[in-house]
Amino acid sequence: MPRFALAAKTPNRFALATLVLLAGASHAQALEGKALFEKLLAQAGPKPVTVTYGSVSESGPASFAAQNVSLKVEGISQPFTIEALTVRGLREKAEGRVSYDAFAISQLAQKTDRGSMAIEGIASSNGDFPVIVLKGSSSAFQPGQAVKFDSFSLSGLSGSNNRNDSTFSLDSIAATKGDIPLVYDYEGKRGLKTDQTLQLESFAMNGIAASGSGSTVTVETVGISSLNVPIVAAGSALAFMTPFSGMFVKSVEVKTNGQTLMTMGDMNVAITNDGGDTYVGKGSFNDVKFEVAGLPERQARETMRRLGYETIEGSMTTTSSYNPKTGVTDLTNTVIDVKDMFAFAMDYKISGYTLEVAQQLQELSFKAEASGSDPTAQFMQMMPLLSQLKVDSMSLSLTDKSLVGKLLDMQAQQMGTSGEQLAAGAPMMLGMGMAGLGMPGLTEMVTSAVGKFLQQKGTLTASVIPANPVSVSDIMMASQTDPKKLPQMMNLQVTAD
């Protein structure tokens, strides 16, 4: 879980603080419009800020428009410049907050010896934020403080860092119905106790491009709908498991030293609830492609080419469901499909993972990480909860799509034999390796299935379907005290079709 706090320690952070006007102000009398704006800016960072205008006009006590605005921060050689600024309805409110009806900024820029930053436009409507004093690396943030707005948009962001020759650009950002807490931390790190959540009705970024250290990443679009994420461990476990209703990423490309390494057509995730108790999640990664020529390791490139691959193309789909009342979690139709190589599928059903158990496990995990407690002690604390989680079934399967034969042929060539001979001898070698386990029944089942799979290809499957669900704690204890019991306890089956 990340920690998030705004602090005006660098020019760019100051710019962010300026844009949302997160600064200190006296409450001796309520200010509005231009006077309030200037007072807020005067306390927007650890060093004094001077604002000058080419021209400015006030259209009422709480609204004004200005052109050719300069924001000069003491100690920074170059000012932030704004071509045009319009603010409507800027007012102090009770309880140390400030609201605005709308603001718009055109052509915000700064250029220094370290690099440059420019934004073509920023606009927001119906905003509400706390008056905060930022002093160096510390802040006056307290639980309960948040920035709120009906809409926010940004266009034409670009920046560069001369120190590492990196660049960044973004065509646009659009967000609606934002409620953004100004503290984002583990419970226990600062002793926070809050039920706040980070909320956005919708969020989208378009035209993302970043480059540096010989690598370039571009993303056409990233979008999220109905974002609702608790900011501390005390938040709802269900909310952590259902942080949004939808998320998508479109058209990703990664290059290294001018050579394409990876592309992805799109990613989609949806979490739905039909009004009942069950939540259903569906996800997909489509048109994923890795270029062998772009792989950074020479040995990896050579191995893939010996196998006959210049590109690795694939996709992934998954479906899951969760009922917080019954505690039943299902993962089905989860398949990683790699063209001309293999398809890997997984599914499972776990019961007993009720919302109460999930909440307790979550809190134990966060507290253990925050305190750095001994892993053994953590495990013992979790054992009573793990005894309530039960494995109903689980299955893993691998379907060959020519990779197995190619691997056998490549290995056989190095050994001076044939792929067929290597496949025929593999069960014996595997059996010798498993002999030390002292489980002849399991050894026979595994070697028989693996031998059939290597010689006939098809699908190799390992599944567990116990007669009655088995608790996770029992599985863990058996693996430590008497692992020979596990195959029978779990009704382990290994087959080839």
Image (tube, helix red, strand yellow):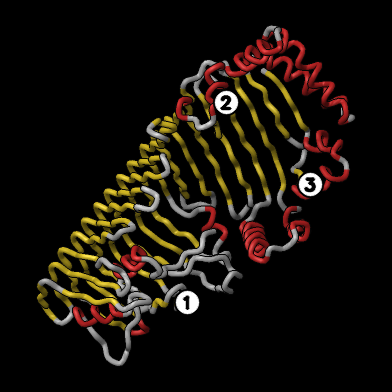
- Is tag 3's residue or tag 2's residue first in the polypeptide sequence? 2
Closer to the camera, 377 or 7?
A: 7
**In what quadrant of the picture does the N terminus appear?**
bottom right
Q: Nearer the viewer, mark 3 or mark 2?
A: 2
The reply, left or right, for residue 133 in relation to residue 171 is right
Tell me the quarter of the picture where residue 346 sits: top right
The reply, left or right, for residue 416 in relation to residue 121 is right
Which residue is drawn at the image coordinates 63% and 52% (left, top)? 326
Disc 2 marks which residue?
299
Point out residue 410 in the picture as x, y percentages from the top left corner: 63, 14
Residue 121 in view of the camera = yes
- Note whether 290 is above or below 155 in the view shown: above
Mark 2 residue type: Gln
Q: Nearer the viewer, mark 2 or mark 1?
A: 2
Disc 1 marks which residue?
142
Q: How far apart are labels 2 and 1 at the CA level?
A: 53 Å
Disc 3 marks which residue?
476
- Is tag 2's residue or tag 1's residue first in the polypeptide sequence? 1
Mark 1 residue type: Gln
Point out residue 360 in the picture as x, y percentages from the top left corner: 66, 62
Q: How far apart are labels 1 and 3 at the CA level?
A: 42 Å
**In what quadrant of the picture does the C terminus appear?**
top right
Tell me the quarter of the picture where residue 258 sits: top left
Point out residue 308 in the picture as x, y percentages from the top left corner: 52, 15
Q: Are marks 1 and 3 in contact (CB under 8 Å)?
A: no
Which residue is drawn at the image coordinates 32% and 83% (left, top)? 25
Which residue is drawn at the image coordinates 31% and 66% (left, top)? 15
Q: Residues within 10 Å of mark 2 (few under 14, many from 20)?
A: few
